[in-house]
Image (cartoon, helix red, strand yellow):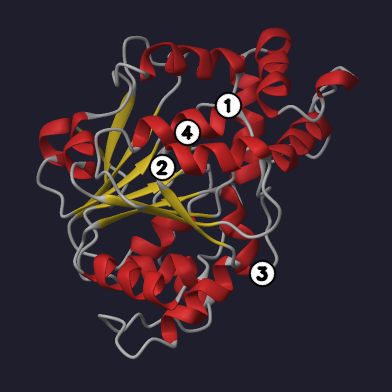
Amino acid sequence: MHAMLNEIVTSLAAGEVVPYLGPELLEQGGENPVPASFEGLAARLSARVTVPFKIRANMTAAAQYIENFKHRKTLVAVMSEIFQPPVAPSALHRYLASLPNLPLLVDTWYDAAAQFSLAGRPNWGQIQGVSRAEHRDQWVKYYQADGTETDEAQAAGWDTVLYKPFGSIAPAANFIVSDSDFVEVLTEIDIQTPIPSRVQTLRSGRRFLFIGCRFRNQLERAYARQTMKRSSLGPHWAVLPGELTRNEIKFLEEQNIQRLDIAPADFLAALHELPVRGHDCGCGAFDSTWAENSRPPMGNLKDWSMSEPVT
């Protein structure tokens, strides 16, 4: 594993790697005010709105039920409430944000920890997936570092692109979360239509490093497979501790992904032990004052503070 770690850190420092972050990375940042898994989010949705018992553990189905029977605005309101609390970037978030060359960072969850970590970085912006139920004929929206909406032409000049394919709470509460949201994307994703051209360009020739991701269901595998499509032949890497399912093992083999059976926090500690890390990551303890000052702009996001479940 030592040789693999050396290869990863050297490639990261050279800007030859696309970090691809999943929700379980949030579990490495200590106590979290937001859910850090599909199942956790399904439980929170079901606690806010009464949904049938058989779909309470299914994130996309629970979201679809709310959208169908309580309206899309209610779903957005509940999601906004769940992800409104600021999330502290983990040490790994801050490590990645400190890399001298970081052309593309992919984050597949709805929180704003990645935006927090990039707040002090020059010339970056984000591309977010948006729901076609709210934005007809649009797959993504572009935002500058200050949260101002911009366009594809502006994104072409960014040194660092944060790609949030599921959307994000900041700056404008964009959420791809319901069955119909994902059906729209997955119907077209094989021909790459929903993936912005800037992301397609930046992934070319680069290897992927998956952290905090699982590949247990078809949705997780489809997004990972299509996002890394036409990138480097690999090998790619996945920081993936614990027992794997049969589908996960098959997916890693098919995509030429080498597994590191190690927790994200231990992965970062191992990088620190290498003789040469390529740069000074500056991954100290999280400073809540810094986080509040660096909080990404929330645009026109309303303060959804419902004290009682929606019925």
The residue under label 2 is 171
Residue 76 appears anywhere in the view: yes
Q: Say the numbered circle drawn on residue 297.
A: none
Q: Say the numbered circle drawn on residue 166.
A: 4
CA distance separating discs 2 and 1: 29 Å
Q: Amino acid at mark 4?
A: Phe
CA distance separating discs 2 and 3: 24 Å
Between circles 4 and 1, the one closer to the viewer is: 1
Q: Residues within 10 Å of mark 3 (few under 14, many from 20)?
A: few
Mark before the other along the chain sequence, 4 or 2: 4
Between circles 2 and 3, the one closer to the viewer is: 3
Between circles 1 and 3, the one closer to the viewer is: 1
Asked which secondary structure carries label 3, the reply is loop
Q: Nearer the viewer, residue 292 or 204?
A: 204
CA distance separating discs 3 and 4: 23 Å
Q: Residues within 10 Å of mark 4 (few under 14, many from 20)?
A: many
Asked which secondary structure carries label 2, the reply is loop
Residue 169 appears anywhere in the view: no
Between circles 2 and 1, the one closer to the viewer is: 1
Q: Say the numbered circle drawn on residue 30.
A: 3
Q: Residue at x 38, y 86 (%)?
A: 274
